[in-house]
Image (cartoon, rainbow, N blue to C red):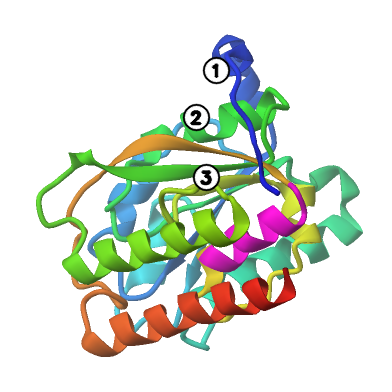
C-alpha cells in the first residue's frame, strides 16, 4: 500500500524556512566538465552543502565543481549508485563526529544540466512542511524540450511506472533522478544498488517503508554532452535489466 501526500499547507512555507533547513545536494557526475558549472550556478542560494561526486571522470569535472563552490568527493568505481553511496557514507561519518551537522533533507540532482536546479525549493517544501518524506520531480511531456528523453527512455519509464501501479498500487509516473528525501528516511532505506537501479530501488523501498511521497511536475531539457545510460545501447539494455530486476524482486516478496 502506498502513502501519497497531497496538501496545500506547503504553499505557506517561506523561502526563509527553506534557507534555514539543512539541505544537502548530492550530484553524481562523470565527465560533466562542460555542464556541472551551470548546474551549480543555478542552485538556489542558502543550501547547506553541495556535494559533487566525481565518478571516475577523465575530464576536469572535479576541478570545475570546486571552482563553482562544491565539495568534491572521488568515487573511482563507475556507477550512479556507487557515487550516491559515497556521498551518503560521507554524510553518515560526518554526523558521527558532528551530530549537529546532520542534514534535514537530501536532494539528488544530475550533473548534466538536463534538470532545472532552481526547482529545488519546490521539491523540498512539502518535506519541510512535514507533508511528505519523498518528493520526485516528475518530467512531463508538456514541460519537456523536444529530444530531451529518447524513445527507449520514455518506454522504460512508462513500463516501470505501469508495473508499479499494477503490482504495488503506486501512483508514480516517473523515475526522475531529481528528487528530495528526508535524511532519516533515506538512511532507513538501506540503499544498495551500485549502478542503474538506484532510482527505482528508492521508489520501491519507499513503498515498502510506507513513506509519504509526492510528484511535482518539473521541466526537462536536452542535456549537455552524451548520456552514459540512454546515449549507448549497452546503457539502455543494462538500465532496463536493472529496473525490471528490482520490480521482479519486490513483486515476489509481496
User: Rounded to the nearest whole Å, what is the CA distance between mark 2 and mark 1?
Assistant: 8 Å
Looking at the rendered structure, the secondary structure element under dot 2 is helix
Q: Position of residue 75 (x, y in %)?
A: 54, 80
Numbered mark located on residue 121 in the image: 2
Q: Quadrant of residue 143?
A: top left
Asked if disc 2 and disc 3 are in contact, CB closer than 8 Å, the reply is no
The residue positioned farthest toward the front in the image shown: 166
Quadrant, the C terminus = bottom right
Is residue 209 positioned above or below 122 on the image? below
Classify 10 Å Cα crowding around label 2: few (below 14), some (14-19), many (20 and above): some
Quadrant of residue 207 in the image? bottom right
**Most foreground residue, 246 or 20:** 246
Disc assigned to residue 171: 3
Image position of 109 (left or right of 211): left
Q: Is residue 106 above or below residue 249?
A: above
Q: Earlier in the sequence, mark 2 or mark 1?
A: 1
Decide if residue 28 is in sight here: yes
Q: Which residues are magenta?
A: 200-210
In the rendered image, the vertical position of residue 208 relative to residue 44, given as above or below: below
Contact, CB < 8 Å: mark 2 with mark 1? yes
Judge whether residue 33 can be spotted in this image. no
Which is more toward the observer, 179 or 112? 179
88 on left or right of 199: right
Distance of label 2 from label 3 (alpha carbons)? 22 Å
Q: Which mark is residue 15?
A: 1
User: Going 31% across and 77% down the picture, which residue do you hit?
Assistant: 229
Along the horizontal axis of the image, is 235 left or right of 10?
left
Disc 3, SS: loop
* Residue depicted at x 22% and y 87%: 233
Amino acid at each position: 500500500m502506498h502513502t501519497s501526500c497531497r496538501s496545500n499547507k506547503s504553499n505557506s512555507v517561506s523561502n526563509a524556512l527553506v534557507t534555514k533547513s539543512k539541505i544537502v545536494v548530492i550530484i553524481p557526475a562523470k565527465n560533466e566538465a562542460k555542464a556541472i558549472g551551470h548546474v551549480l550556478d543555478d542552485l538556489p542560494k542558502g543550501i547547506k552543502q553541495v556535494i559533487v561526486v566525481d565518478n571516475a571522470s577523465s575530464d576536469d569535472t572535479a576541478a570545475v565543481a570546486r571552482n563553482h563552490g562544491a565539495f568534491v568527493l572521488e568515487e573511482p568505481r563507475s556507477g550512479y549508485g556507487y557515487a550516491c553511496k559515497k556521498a551518503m557514507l560521507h554524510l553518515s561519518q560526518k554526523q558521527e563526529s558532528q551530530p549537529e551537522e546532520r542534514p534535514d533533507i537530501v536532494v539528488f540532482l544530475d550533473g548534466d544540466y538536463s534538470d532545472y536546479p532552481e526547482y529545488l525549493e519546490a521539491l523540498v517544501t512539502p518535506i519541510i512542511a512535514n507533508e511528505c518524506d519523498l518528493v520526485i520531480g516528475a518530467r512531463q511531456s508538456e514541460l519537456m524540450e523536444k529530444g530531451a528523453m529518447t524513445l527507449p527512455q520514455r518506454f522504460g519509464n512508462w513500463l516501470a511506472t505501469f508495473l508499479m501501479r499494477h503490482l504495488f498500487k503506486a501512483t508514480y509516473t516517473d523515475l526522475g533522478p531529481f528528487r528530495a528525501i528526508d535524511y532519516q528516511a533515506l538512511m532507513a532505506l538501506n540503499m544498495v544498488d551500485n549502478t542503474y537501479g538506484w532510482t527505482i530501488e528508492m521508489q520501491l523501498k519507499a513503498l515498502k517503508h510506507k513513506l509519504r511521497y509526492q510528484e511535482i511536475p518539473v521541466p526537462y531539457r536536452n542535456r549537455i554532452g552524451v548520456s552514459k545510460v540512454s546515449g549507448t545501447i549497452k546503457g539502455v539494455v543494462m538500465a532496463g535489466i536493472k529496473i525490471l530486476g528490482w520490480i521482479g524482486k519486490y513483486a515476489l516478496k509481496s
